[in-house]
Amino acid sequence: MDPLDRIDELITMVEQARSVPMSRNNCMFDRGEMIAVLDELRAELPADLRRAAALLDERDKIMEAGKREADRIIAEGETEHARLVSVNEITVSAEHEGARIVAEARAEAQRLRDEVDDYVDTALANFEQFLTRALASIERGRDKMHALREIGTFSGEEAERPLNF
């Protein structure tokens, strides 16, 4: 179950809990059930956080691999370029070929960077949506809790005031 669903379930449990007699703020609910839901939530949240951290690590590895590959291709191109330039009869051809290889390497490096950026952006956007939903759910829960507290406060004050005739 999604961690947001777990939070909604907890909010529902608190909302539906019976009030403690003679108390305006306290309620009763099944301790075992509440602990079970909280344990499940605790188990799910770290998995999502680990998954986000793994995505960031994977992004860094992909970017590093792309940079190494680009550097290798560029070095290869420059080496090939230098070799071709040293041969007098094909100097002009070698300069063009070397430039082409370097341009291809740079284009490939840029393509790899663009792919990594798109992948990371998508992964982070998904994680952002998850966190936004989680925050919205938490805010709704807090709002409900505050509303319940306000309702309990008002009815409690009316009951405690002496009647004036």
Image (cartoon, rainbow, N blue to C red):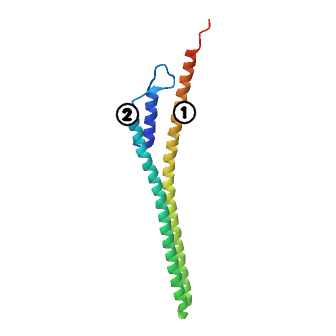
Tell me where residue 103 appears, x and y as whole percent. Answer: 54, 76
Tell me if 164 is positioned left or right of 36 in this view. right
Q: Is residue 97 visible?
A: no
Q: CA distance from mark 2 to mark 1?
A: 25 Å
Q: Is residue 22 above or below residue 10?
A: above
Q: State which quarter of the image contains the N terminus.
A: top left
**Residue contact at pointers 2 and 1, CB within 8 angstroms:** no
Foreground pick, 108 / 22: 22
First along the sequence among labels 2 and 1: 2
Tell me where residue 26 appears, x and y as whole percent. Answer: 48, 26
Q: Is residue 4 above or below residue 113?
A: above
Q: State which quadrant residue 150 falls in.
A: top right
Tell me where residue 110 appears, x and y as whole percent. Answer: 53, 68
Q: Is residue 37 visible?
A: yes
Foreground pick, 116 / 49: 49
| Label 1 secondary element | helix
Find disc 2 in the rendering and name its residue: 32
Q: State which quarter of the image contains the C terminus.
A: top right
| Label 2 secondary element | helix
- Which residue is pictured at 52% across the width and 35% down the height? 140
Residue furthest bottom as drawn: 89
Residue furthest right as drawn: 165
- Which residue is pictured at 51% across the width and 67% down the height? 111
Tell me where residue 45 appears, x and y as whole percent. Answer: 44, 46
Find disc 1 in the rendering and name its residue: 143
Q: What amino acid is found at the position of numbered circle 2 in the picture?
A: Gly
- Which residue is pictured at 47% across the width and 53% down the height? 52
Q: Is residue 87 above or below residue 75?
A: below
**Classed neighbour count for the residue bearing mark 1: other residues with Cα under 10 Å, few (<14), some (14–19), many (≥20):** few
Foreground pick, 40 / 8: 40
- Which residue is pictured at 43% across the width and 35% down the height? 9
Q: What amino acid is found at the position of numbered circle 1 in the picture?
A: Asp
